[in-house]
Amino acid sequence: MENVTPLPRSDSGPTASRTEPQVSFTRLELDRILSLYGRMVAAGLWRDYALALGPKQASFSAFRRTAENPEIRIVKDPALRQRQGEWALYGEGGIVLKRGHELPGVLAVVERRLLKLVER
């Protein structure tokens, strides 16, 4: 029991270090998105979400039900930062609902829908 033999490192497994950078949401961005998600869940509109983080873009998808296509997708694509803006909001059919340089402006489309439901 005194001898400890180190295991050889595998560079192809899940613990392998990534050579390419990964796009992700900052803490403030994720807080803003999850705050909206929580309000939509409380209103009974959304029930599930998914995060996808990749080398080119990060995506947050919100679902009405688990087995459906996402109702909305919020995508962060830093490659478009100097052009159309790094943020995009996609609808159910994959159409772009809003693009912008800042997250609050893009999320305003969904937040307006939530306000209309409260006013009834």
Image: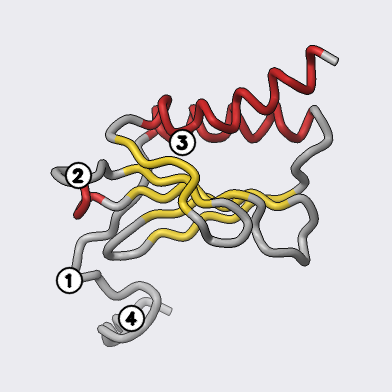
Colour pattern: secondary structure
Disc 1 element:
loop
Spatial CA distance of label 1 from label 2 is: 23 Å
Mark 1 or mark 2, whichever is nearer to me: 2
Of the numbered discs 3 and 4, the one sitting upstream in the chain is 4
Disc 3 element:
helix
Of the numbered discs 3 and 1, the one sitting upstream in the chain is 1
Of the numbered discs 4 and 2, the one sitting upstream in the chain is 4
Tag 3–tag 1 contact (CB < 8 Å)? no
Q: Which residue is mark 4?
A: 3
Give the total of numbered labels.
4
Residue 53: x and y, percent? 40, 59
Disc 4 element:
loop
Q: Amino acid at mark 3?
A: Leu
Q: Point out which mark residue 30 bears.
A: 3
Disc 2 element:
loop
Mark 4 or mark 2, whichever is nearer to me: 2
Mark 3 or mark 1, whichever is nearer to me: 3
Q: Which residue lies at the image location 19% right of the left edge and 54% below the top edge?
A: 79
Q: Is residue 8 left or right of residue 94?
A: left
Residue 37: x and y, percent? 64, 35
Q: Which residue is mark 2?
A: 81
Given residues 18 and 99, the one toward you in this image is 99
Q: Amino acid at mark 4?
A: Asn
Of the numbered discs 3 and 2, the one sitting upstream in the chain is 3
Q: Which residue lies at the image location 79% right of the left edge and 12% below the top edge?
A: 119
In the figure, 116 relative to 37: above or below? above
In the figure, 51 relative to 116: above or below? below
